[in-house]
Image (cartoon, grey):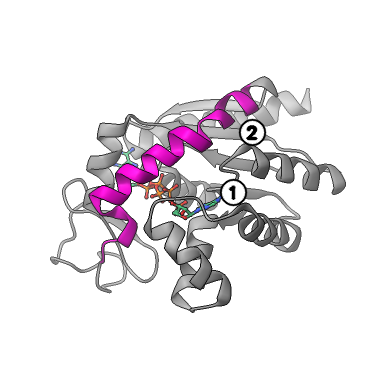
Amino acid sequence: MSELNLILLGPPGAGKGTQAARLRKDFDLAYIATGDLLRSHVADETELGREAAAYMDAGKLVPDPLVIAMILDKVEEEGDDGFLLDGFPRNDAQADALGEELDQLGRRLTAALLVEAPDDIVIERLSGRRTCANGHVQHVTFDPPKVDGMCDLCGRPLKQRKDDQPDVVQKRLETYHEQTESLIDYYDEKGLLRRFDGTRSPTEVHDHIRATLATLRLEERL
Ligand code: AP5
């Protein structure tokens, strides 16, 4: 079977992480989530984490040199049989670096999966999102925990991410529009972009992505 090398694009809160969790179950792909990796550096108080925290808390992008090396090393270490990148690339320089790395490895991207949602929906979703220490995600309105404040899956306390505070969400959205949105044209021009309506239910979005990937694989075999 041909390898799948995928990236997930879209504004914060569009549902990239939600879809990634499902796609990982469907396809045995290395999942490399920039935000998760950075948050674990922050929690472990590494040098990188200390440097990244101020940018993340302000809703800004962490500087390219820190992020590019971290992600490309992971792709090389874990992505031999295919990968799913969530949160990378986030600007043209990161996209160029990824393209060059894949060229050097003699590999190529299968598709850039764009999950789209308008700003008002994103703000509502992120302000109600709660996460446990195991990374499970729930929403106070759309997926309320059975026991208040506790994760349905593992029973650990649910917390709000620092950058899900309304003023930081606003800043993250601005950063997305200013620096990341241009990647839509970047990948469209390469014929790699596939669009998904993130305002549909998680199951509908997932079904659409799976159907698209099945078609891509069929086309590759022709
Ligand atoms: P990161 O962790 O990557 O955050 P993000 O892209 O802002 O995305 P989120 O994880 O917040 O949203 P999501 O789209 O995954 O939504 P989710 O599925 O959880 O980055 C954090 C920070 O790290 C950045 O701000 C930056 O500082 C730094 N960083 C990261 N990558 C970087 C890079 N490459 N370069 C430099 N800096 C970088 O869903 C959200 C909510 O909606 C949940 O409650 C969920 O249950 C609900 N939901 C999801 N789908 C649906 C649906 N279809 N219908 C209804 N509700 C839904």
Question: Is 215 within the magenta?
Answer: no
- Quadrant of the image occupied by residue 107: top right
Q: Where is residue 4 in the image (x, y as percent from the top left)?
A: 68, 42
Query: In this picture, which residue range is highlighted in magenta?
Result: 159-188
Q: Mark 2 points at which residue?
A: 111
CA–CA distance between discs 2 and 1? 11 Å
Q: Where is residue 6 in the image (x, y as percent from the top left)?
A: 63, 41
Residue at image x 19%, y 60%?
145
Under circle 2, the secondary element is strand
Amino acid marked by disc 2: Ala
Amino acid marked by disc 1: Leu
In the image, taking residue 12 as reference, residue 209 lies left or right, namely right
Up-down: is 25 above or below 215? below
Up-down: is 38 above or below 169? below
Asked whether residue 1 is in view, the answer is no
Residue at image x 52%, y 37%?
179
Q: Name the residue under label 1.
A: 85
